[in-house]
Amino acid sequence: MIPAALPWVASLRVVQVHRLLDPEVLARRMKLEADAELCPLCVARPVRVRSTGLCRVCHLRELAERHREAIDELEAQRELWTARQQLKRGRDRGSGAEVEDRAGE
Ligand SMILES: [Zn+2]
């Protein structure tokens, strides 16, 4: 769901979908595909994104995967901070040796 404060995001998505389905754009793509190099990941579609050398579908999927990876890294970082805080609290309570031994397991 798109927040009401960002209506331009919704209109941008509609414009992007319309542009992708435009008959002229589709015809241009068909002409270019005749001698185009195939995407190394799917080996089914032509390379369309020069920066990655992938087709647009694989490029977007890889981008989504990198975003998911970044989210996982943030969650792992939060877990590490929480574990460190718990260890520090244990030490502050005077049971540092016991907590430290457990952390080394
Ligand atoms: Zn591909």
Image (cartoon, rainbow, N blue to C red):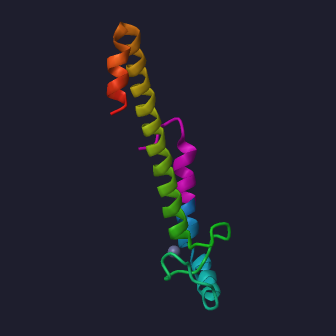
Nearer the observer, 68 or 1: 68
What percent of the width, then of the height, locates residue 34? 61, 91
Prevailing SS of the magenta stretch: helix
Dividing the picture into quadrants, the one containing residue 46 is bottom right
Nearer the observer, 102 or 55: 102
| Magenta span | 1-15
On whether residue 63 falls in the magenta region, the answer is no
Depicted 37 relative to depicted 60: above or below: below
At 38% from the left and 15% from the top, the residue drawn is 96
Depicted 104 relative to depicted 11: above or below: above
* Quarter containing the C terminus: top left
At 62% from the left and 84% from the top, the residue drawn is 37
What percent of the width, then of the height, locates residue 89? 39, 14
Dividing the picture into quadrants, the one containing residue 56 is bottom right
On whether residue 11 falls in the magenta region, the answer is yes
47 relative to 61 in the view: left or right: right
What percent of the width, then of the height, locates residue 48? 62, 74
At 37% from the left and 31% from the top, the residue drawn is 104
What percent of the width, then of the height, locates residue 51? 67, 66
75 relative to 38 in the view: left or right: left
Nearer the observer, 22 or 42: 42
* Quarter containing the N terminus: top left
At 32% from the left and 18% from the top, the residue drawn is 98
Depicted 21 relative to depicted 88: above or below: below
40 relative to 92 in the view: left or right: right
